[in-house]
Image: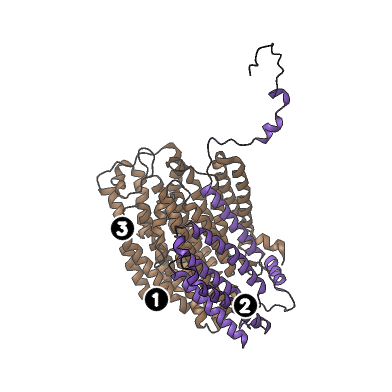
């Protein structure tokens, strides 16, 4: 019972916040709604018994990607004075949202401990004694090795592409030449002089 | 897993990948000076991969527990892909040397090779995961190649437009795949086909629609064609050569693979989608091409139109239909390569590329050989009988009528007549208009290009009908691998 309640809660919030992501006019709000959507998607994964994927979703998407998005959003021309105005007025809403998230976590936890959601169709019913990470690792590096290597090539192409499109050879830049530094000898750079008294040294 | 026997089956992909990685290192150390050497070495790698296809890679076995199909169909598509990729590498140095923007860098052939790996994965996919990874590998390389001329704003625009719309299409495809996976319980083509065979529920059907929408974007079929003219116009011409030939073959082969291999039992469901996309592409490609003034845009609409005819063979849903699609794509690749090679020869007094159709006026008097070759390609693309372009059109019409789809075939034939108008308009511009004298004579650097034009013209000439007899059993065998 509690699983069903938790499922519909998470699913409902995902859909709601995804809708608000695309419909809100302020890009900062958009990103915040997106983070909420990712968070609830992670909750759904917990209910399915895929704890590792849920944690990945939180760490990779909420942690890295959303923060990256926020940085990009910060580069947009947004009036922050306007944004900060009314902080006190909106504070109760923020507290309410925080409480709602906390409640979600509690409901999700009880849903998970009550046994999670049974999926109707399972591709490969796994041995329940195997932990998540081990199960994924076994598939990823044996059965799906070919796809894994393909994904590696996709990343390589992305890297080559980024360099090809942005790298520019700049003229007039002094570069370090290690070999000429190492090959330099004392006799190339020092000279013995016998200056006469009262006369300077011509360098 | 039985490692080494799987590796033998993916030998062409291994050759291409290792070749691309080694050449990447050569490019990193050799710098700009190594461009020509890397280009020719990558053509050699493509030839090597083509030779590797002759072995177990076309035996019909499955590698990696059904993830990768090394069958005759994939091998046939890969031959076309490798040839087209090689041509788009060969023509690049001469093009980039004459443009005022960026020079050719050695990453160009390397990205082409990696795109060829992706296309190979697409046509050999036996699992939705391989299909998607291959598609992304090919697309990502294509986005970079489209904006390869960094100082040219049109090239950058083409790359960005292709990237944004391509990402959207990938999202749609992935959504469809996730629905299919969710309702069938597997990403394997065999098990998906079994799920469609049983009782396809609403979820599976919605998934099918999304998957086909994503694929329709990749093959540029109406109503998902909007990006094609803009990208073809802005991207560097040698890259467009690859878009219009190699990537088109890969995407159409992918459509065949998914429709017949993974979703074969749902024939009645996807047939409606394919028939609609086919007729819409034929008619829209023909009508929208009429008002174009840029030759690359016109060829983009021509490619939309031709994809419509290729889909007609798929719409038949039979083994003969699939064989007709393969022969259609073969002849289409030759005609399109020829047309783009001629477009590459359209150069002004300073060697800058000219793309307007008006500049072709009176080309028959200033450059009779080039005009004759272009006229042949245009007649052939229009499907006018003595030339080879007529035969595959006839084959797809036959396939459609054999499957009992008479209305479909008749509508396609009408569309083909409408399409003939704009091809003939170009011939009229070249032969009957007063010379514009914008396109100047040939220079020594393009001898190889002229050789390629001559070969392409020879293949599509009536002599090309001699190829049909040896080609027919090969396409039939390749198509039967899907059933």
What is the drawing colour of chain A? purple
**Image coordinates for residue A9, horizontal then vertical, percent:** 56, 81
Task: Give the number of the disc on residue B422.
Answer: 3
In which quarter of the view is residue A23 placed?
bottom left
Disc 2: CA contacts within 10 A as few (<14), some (14-19) or many (>=20): some
Observer-side mark, 2 or 1, equals: 2
Image coords of residue B452 (percent x, y) = 46, 47
Alpha-carbon distance for marks 3 and 1? 27 Å
Secondary element type, mark 2: helix
* Label annotation for residue B405: 1
Taking B392 as reference, is B341 above or below it? above
Q: Chain of mark 2?
A: A
Q: Which chain is brown?
A: B
- Per the image, the residue denoted by label 2 is A105
Give whichever of discs 3 and 1 has the lower sequence position: 1
Query: Which of the two residues, B424 or B29, is positioned nearer the viewer here?
Result: B29
Query: In what quadrant of the picture does the C terminus of chain B appear?
Result: bottom right
Residue A152 shown left or right of residue A21 in the figure: right
Q: CA distance from mark 3 to mark 2?
A: 64 Å
């Amino acid at each position: 019972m509690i699983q069903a309640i938790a499922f519909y809660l998470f699913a409902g919030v995902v859909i709601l916040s995804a809708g608000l992501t695309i419909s809100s006019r302020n890009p900062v709000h958009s990103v915040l709604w997106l983070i909420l959507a990712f968070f609830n998607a992670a909750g759904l994964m917990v209910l399915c018994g895929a704890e590792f994927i849920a944690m990945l979703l939180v760490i990779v998407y909420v942690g890295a990607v959303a923060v990256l998005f926020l940085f990009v959003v910060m580069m947009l021309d947004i009036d922050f004075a306007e944004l900060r105005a009314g902080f006190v007025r909106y504070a109760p809403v923020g507290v309410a949202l925080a409480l709602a998230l906390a409640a979600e976590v509690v409901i999700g936890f009880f849903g998970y401990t009550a046994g999670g959601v049974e999926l109707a169709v399972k591709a490969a019913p796994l041995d329940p004694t195997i932990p998540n990470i081990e199960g994924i690792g076994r598939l990823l590096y044996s059965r799906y090795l070919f796809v894994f290597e393909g994904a590696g090539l996709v990343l390589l192409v992305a890297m080559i592409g980024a360099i090809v499109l942005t790298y520019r050879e700049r003229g007039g830049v002094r570069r370090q030449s290690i070999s000429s530094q190492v090959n330099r000898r004392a006799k190339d750079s020092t000279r013995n002089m016998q200056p006469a008294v009262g006369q300077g040294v011509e360098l | 897993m039985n490692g080494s026997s799987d590796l033998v089956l993916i030998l062409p992909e291994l050759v291409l990948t290792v070749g691309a990685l080694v050449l990447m290192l050569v490019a990193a150390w050799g710098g700009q000076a190594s461009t020509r050497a890397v280009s020719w070495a990558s053509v050699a790698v493509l030839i090597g991969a083509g030779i590797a296809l002759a072995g177990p890679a076309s035996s019909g076995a499955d590698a990696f527990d059904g993830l990768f199909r090394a069958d005759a169909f994939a091998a046939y598509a890969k031959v076309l892909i490798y040839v087209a990729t090689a041509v788009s590498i060969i023509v690049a140095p001469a093009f980039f040397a004459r443009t005022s923007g960026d020079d050719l860098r050695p990453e160009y052939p390397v990205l082409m090779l990696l795109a060829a790996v992706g296309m190979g994965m697409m046509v050999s996919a036996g699992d939705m995961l391989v299909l998607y990874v291959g598609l992304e590998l090919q697309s990502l390389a294509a986005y970079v190649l489209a904006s390869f001329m960094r100082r040219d704003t049109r090239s950058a625009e083409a790359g960005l437009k292709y990237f944004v719309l391509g990402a959207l299409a990938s999202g749609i495809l992935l959504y469809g795949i996730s629905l299919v996976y969710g309702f069938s319980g597997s990403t394997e083509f065999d098990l998906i086909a079994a799920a469609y065979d049983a009782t396809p529920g609403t979820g599976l059907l919605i998934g099918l629609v999304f998957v086909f929408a994503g694929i329709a974007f990749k093959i540029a079929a109406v109503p998902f064609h909007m990006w094609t003219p803009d990208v073809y116009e802005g991207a560097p011409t040698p890259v467009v050569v690859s878009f219009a030939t190699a990537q088109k073959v890969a995407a159409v082969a992918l459509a065949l693979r998914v429709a017949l291999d993974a979703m074969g039992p749902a024939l009645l469901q996807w047939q409606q989608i394919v028939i609609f996309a086919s007729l819409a592409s034929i008619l829209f490609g023909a009508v929208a091409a009429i008002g174009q003034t840029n030759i690359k845009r016109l060829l983009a609409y021509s490619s939309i139109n031709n994809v419509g005819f290729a889909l007609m063979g798929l719409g038949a849903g039979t083994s003969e239909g699939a064989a007709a699609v393969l022969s259609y794509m073969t002849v289409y690749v030759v005609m399109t390569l020829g047309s783009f090679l001629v477009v590459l020869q359209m150069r002004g007094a300073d060697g800058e590329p000219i793309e307007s159709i008006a500049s072709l006026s009176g080309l028959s008097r200033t450059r009779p050989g080039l005009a004759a070759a272009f006229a042949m390609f245009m007649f052939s693309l229009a499907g006018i009988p003595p030339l080879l372009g007529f035969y595959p059109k006839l084959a797809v019409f036959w396939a459609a009528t054999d499957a009992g789809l008479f209305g479909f075939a008749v509508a396609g034939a009408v569309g083909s007549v409408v399409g003939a108008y704009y091809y003939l308009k170009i011939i009229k511009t070249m032969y009957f208009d007063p010379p514009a004298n914008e396109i100047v004579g040939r220079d020594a650097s393009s001898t190889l290009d002229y050789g390629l034009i001559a070969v392409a013209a020879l293949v599509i000439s009536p002599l090309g009908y001699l190829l049909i007899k040896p080609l027919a059993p090969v396409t039939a065998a390749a198509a039967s691998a899907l059933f």
